[in-house]
Image (cartoon, rainbow, N blue to C red):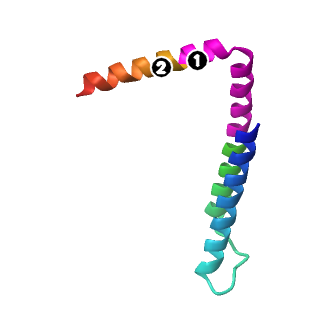
Amino acid sequence: MMAKQHRNAELDELHADLARLSAAEGDAPSTDKPDWVEDVDKVAREWHAKLAEASEDVEDVVRAHPLAAISAALLLGIIIGRVMGRAQ
């Protein structure tokens, strides 16, 4: 739960920084935004919502089955290590 709050706070800070930087580009902030800016903002908000939902689902699964989650992470780490070892 704390990770979710931290992640949301960090995303809010990044959004505020982007708004401040875009306002600083011009002397007066314009209300006319290109269509692509609105599209990017809409897609970013959709991704944020989907990622937040997915992280909640993962947290619930890990709480319900901690041993399985640890085993899966260990197995994934071993597989990645083997694949990276072969690449060299």
| Residue at image point 61% right, 83% down | 26
- Judged from the image, the secondary structure of the residue bearing numbered disc 2 is helix
Task: For marks 2 and 1, give the CA distance.
Answer: 10 Å
Residue 30 coordinates in the image, percent (x, y): 70, 79
View extreme (left): residue: 88
Say which residue appears at 74% left-offset and 40% top-offset.
2
Question: In this rendering, is residue 68 above or below 15?
Answer: above
Question: x and y percent of residue 1 in the render?
Answer: 77, 36
Local packing at callout 1 (Cα closer than 10 Å; few below 14, some 14-19, many 20+) is: few
The amino acid type of the residue labelled 2 equals Leu
Of the two numbered discs 2 and 1 in the rendering, the one whose residue sits closer to the viewer: 1
Magenta stretch: give its range.
Answer: 50-72
**Magenta run includes residue 58:** yes
Task: Name the residue nearer the viewer: 79 or 44.
Answer: 79
Q: Callout 1, which amino acid? A: Ile
Total numbered badges shown on the rendered structure: 2
| Circles 2 and 1 in contact, beta carbons < 8 Å | no
* Marker disc for residue 70: 1
Residue 9: mark in rendering: none
Quadrant of the snapshot with the C terminus: top left
Q: Is residue 59 left or right of residue 18?
A: right
